[in-house]
Image (tube, grey):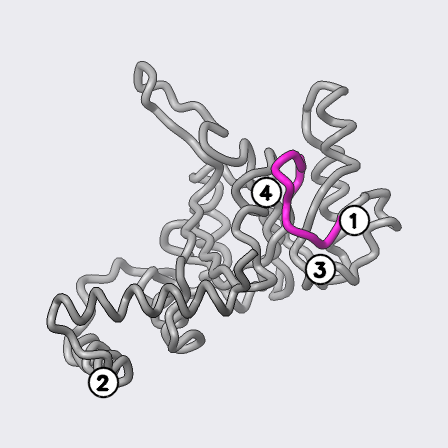
């Protein structure tokens, strides 16, 4: 099986051939500097008025997107909050049993006291049949109630997309006002832009059939957000 390093080298070789065919330079630093200068030289477009409390605005807009939100004071409260949320779901017994006892999380949450909350949560990538996926969040956008996930070696995108229930751990300080603010934060934190950025606005949905909205069509049926820290 090819390693991640081998895949990265193969990807770069392919992109180099594409740039050569298009007459583009391989000087990534120069191209990146030119792109940054282009962005900085142009003012932002019209931005809607935003209330000072971006956390309250995010919670309001996330609710409009059919997400549910709970605020907790500290990271240690996460397992109990997840258990409380699962206990409150009105699910058929067979599904509820699986939901409450099988879940996966990103490695950053492996140290939490999941057994103390009567939850069996494993820090591993989902195998596709897990009912609960728990992830972190790079940042969130108050204007639209949108979560921004940036994949990485220990930040598996599938954990947010495949399970029926997606629980998101969001630090209050990582909520920004607008999408422009979110992308500026990504550029500052990840100069070598990530291979993907996932924008999640509530559960998966479709209106393809008779314009009737159906949740969980292409991903989670439900998205629950735990906002950690900040005044409540």
Residue 45 locus on image (x, y percent): 18, 64
The mark lying in front, picked from 1 and 4, is 4
The mark lying in front, picked from 3 and 1, is 3
> Residue tagged by mark 3?
109
Q: Is residue 229 above or below residue 198?
A: below
**Magenta-highlighted residues:** 122-132
> Residue tagged by mark 2?
30
Q: CA distance from mark 2 to mark 1?
A: 49 Å
Residue 189 locus on image (x, y percent): 44, 76
Q: Check if residue 125 falls in the magenta segment.
A: yes
Outermost residue toward the right in this view: 116
The answer to whether 30 appears left or right of 11 in the picture is left
Locate residue 173: give its quadrant.
bottom right
> Residue tagged by mark 1?
80
Q: Main secondary structure of the magenta part?
A: loop
Mark 2 or mark 1, earlier in chain: 2
Mark 3 or mark 1, earlier in chain: 1
């Amino acid at each position: 099986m090819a390693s991640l390093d081998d895949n990265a080298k193969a990807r770069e070789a392919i992109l180099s051939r594409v740039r050569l065919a298009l007459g583009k330079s391989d000087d990534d630093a120069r191209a990146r500097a030119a792109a940054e200068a282009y962005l900085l030289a142009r003012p932002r477009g019209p931005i809607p008025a935003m209330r000072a409390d971006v956390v309250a605005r995010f919670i309001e807009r996330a609710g409009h997107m059919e997400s549910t939100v709970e605020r907790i004071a500290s990271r240690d409260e996460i397992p109990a909050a997840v258990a409380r949320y699962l206990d409150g779901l009105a699910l058929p017994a067979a599904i509820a049993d699986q939901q409450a006892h099988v879940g996966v999380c990103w490695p950053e949450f492996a140290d939490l006291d999941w057994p103390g909350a009567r939850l069996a949560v494993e820090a591993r990538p989902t195998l596709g049949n897990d009912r609960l996926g728990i992830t972190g969040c790079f940042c969130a956008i108050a204007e639209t109630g949108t979560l921004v996930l940036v994949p990485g070696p220990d930040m598996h995108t599938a954990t947010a997309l495949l399970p029926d229930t997606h629980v998101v751990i969001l630090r209050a300080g990582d909520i920004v006002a607008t999408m422009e603010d979110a992308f500026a934060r990504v550029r500052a934190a990840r100069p070598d832009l990530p291979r993907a950025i996932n924008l999640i606005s509530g559960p998966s949905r479709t209106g393809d059939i008779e314009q009737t909205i159906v949740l969980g069509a292409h991903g989670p049926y439900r998205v629950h957000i735990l906002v950690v820290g900040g005044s409540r």
